[in-house]
Image (cartoon, rainbow, N blue to C red):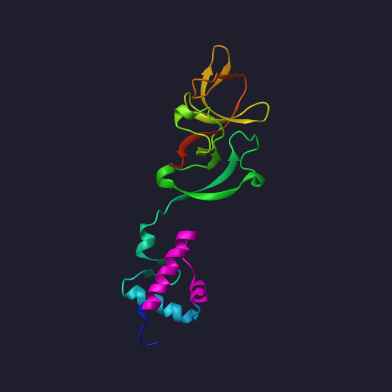
Amino acid sequence: MRSKSPKRMQEILDYVNNYAEFYKTSPSTREIANALKIGNSTVYRYLVDMNENGMLEYDGSEIITPTIRKMETGSIRAAVLGSVSCGVPLLEEEYIESYVSLPEKLFGKGEFFILKANGDSMIEAGISDGDFVVIRKEIEAHEGEIVVALLDDGSNTLKRIYFDDENKNVILHPENKTMNDLIVKNVKIQGVVVKVMKDL
C-alpha cells in the first residue's frame, strides 16, 4: 500500500472516537478492521502512518486521538433505580433499570445511584415530582443534609434530616410548608443527595 486514502483515515478516526465515547477505551485493530471491512494489517499500517503524521497517537495497542484527549477521563457508573418512595432494597440488580456514566469532575469520588423523585414534599428545596436525584451512597449524614432514609416499615423517603438528641428522635423534614415533619426513633441512611437533574 503505497498511499493512504484521506477518506479511509477519517473513517478510522471517526470510528475510534465513537468507540471511545461509548466504551471509554480505544478499539483493537481487529475491531476497526471488522467495522470498516478492511484487513487487520491494513488498519495497522494506517495507524502507524497516522501516528507518524500526528493525526493520532498509537503505541501498538492503545489509540489516542485529539478528541479522546479532550474527553472527560474520569467517570463513575451510577445505577438508575425506580421511584424514591418505592420501598425496594437499594442497589440490588433486579431493581436497577439501567446504568449511566457521571463525570467524576462534577460529582466527585464515591458510589452513586439515581432515583426518580415522587411527590412534592421537597419542592421548596428545588426537587419536583419526576426529577432525577443523584445520591452518594452513605450510611451516615450530617444535620441538614437531604437524605434517602429507609424507615422501619420498609419504605424509602427523601427528606432533610435533623437530630433531636434530647428526645433521641430523628426528624425528617419535608421542604414543603404544607407538610409536617416525620419524627421517628430509628432510620437507616441509604444516601445523601448531591445533585438534581430536571427537565426545563
The residue positioned farthest toward the right in the image shown: 153
Q: What is the tally of numbered marks visible in this picture?
A: 0
Left or right: 6 with respect to 61?
Answer: left
Residue at x 41%, y 68% (from the top left corner): 14
Residue 177 visible: yes
- 58 vs 17, nearest the viewer: 17
Q: Tell me where residue 188 sits by quadrant.
A: top right
Q: Position of residue 85 (x, y in %)?
A: 61, 33
Of residue 138 and residue 60, the one placed in the foreground of this image is: 138
**Any part of residue 62 in sight:** no
**Mostly what secondary structure, the magenta segment?**
helix
The residue at 52%/75% (across/down) is 34
Provide residue 89's location: percent of width, then percent of height.
65, 38
Name the quadrant of the N terminus: bottom left
Seen from this angle, which residue lies furthest left?
A: 53
Q: Is residue 18 magenta?
A: yes
Indicate whether 168 appears above or below 2: above
State the image coordinates of residue 39 (x, y, percent, origin top left): 49, 81
Vertical order, 178 against 32 (above or below): above
Nearest the viewer among 9 and 28 is: 9
Q: Quadrant of the C terminus?
A: top left
Assess whether residue 162 is covered by the magenta stretch.
Answer: no
* Residue at image coords 37%, 65%: 65
Q: Quadrant of residue 66?
A: bottom left
Residue 44, image x, y percentages: 44, 77
Does residue 22 sit above or below 192 in this rendering? below
Q: What span is colored magenta in the figure?
A: 7-36
